[in-house]
Amino acid sequence: DQQVKQNSPSLSVQEGRISILNCDYTNSMFDYFLWYKKYPAEGPTFLISISSIKDKNEDGRFTVFLNKSAKHLSLHIVPSQPGDSAVYFCAASARAGGTSYGKLTFGQGTILTVHP
Amino acid sequence: GAVVSQHPSRVICKSGTSVKIECRSLDFQATTMFWYRQFPKQSLMLMATSNEGSKATYEQGVEKDKFLINHASLTLSTLTVTSAHPEDSSFYICSARDPIRVGYEQYFGPGTRLTVT
């Protein structure tokens, strides 16, 4: 049961344009969402997060939007740069206590390629 | 801040031997660390949650006797793959949460590529 889904395996964007990466989730208990960037043979690097009490969070070129009713979030990168080329994972967590506390559930990842 | 290291970065071992992977939080104390594995072109799969001073919590389908986790201090967790087999070959990544930070971000180590021959 894939609770976090990234339905686009890849995305190709021209340098300077906007990159929009999408993520859907099914578990209504998720209330904290994160985006990570990953290069091959390296660990993921944290990019940006959002709590379910917000619908937008911005950090420099990165903005995450959350639509709770649709159980959908997206990461916008603008302007896109060639150095942004990597695999992007969205992840979700449930704040509730118990054994699931703090666990992250990851999507399958989207390969972003930014062309010069 | 929030730097996590892993050692070794690569290891090759023979079938039947055991391999230990270390995960350290370098600039914060991590009461909770996580161990993941990643197969080629797939997502990160959580194997277990490691809590300092207590037993690890394993995800369904992960053999706790095969993947031994020890979290003896606030800055170190180890994963030992016992009696390794070729199907254990994978990319193993640890992460840690900084309890001081408000969010639920996990900070990841660089990963360990395990190859079992």
Image (spheres, rainbow, N blue to C red):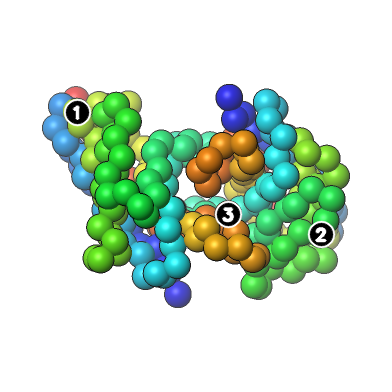
**On screen, residue B87 above or below A77:** below
**Is the residue under label 2 in contact with that under label 3 (CB below 8 Å)?**
no
Quadrant of the image containing the N terminus of chain B: top right
Mark 3 or 1, nearer chain start: 1
| Three-letter amino acid code of the residue under disc 2 | Lys
Q: Front-most of A85 and B23?
A: B23
| Three-letter amino acid code of the residue under disc 1 | Pro
Q: Front-most of A113 and A62?
A: A62
| Three-letter amino acid code of the residue under disc 3 | Gly
Helix, strand or loop for disc 2: loop
| A115 lies left or right of A107 | left
Q: Report which residue position mark 2 lands on.
A: B55
Distance between mark 3 and mark 2 Cα atoms: 16 Å
Residue at horizontal 36 percent and vertical 65 percent from the top: A25
Helix, strand or loop for disc 3: loop
**Is the residue under label 2 in contact with that under label 1 (CB below 8 Å)?**
no
Q: Report which residue position mark 1 lands on.
A: A79
**On screen, residue B75 above or below A2:** above
Residue at horizontal 26 percent and vertical 29 percent from the top: A61
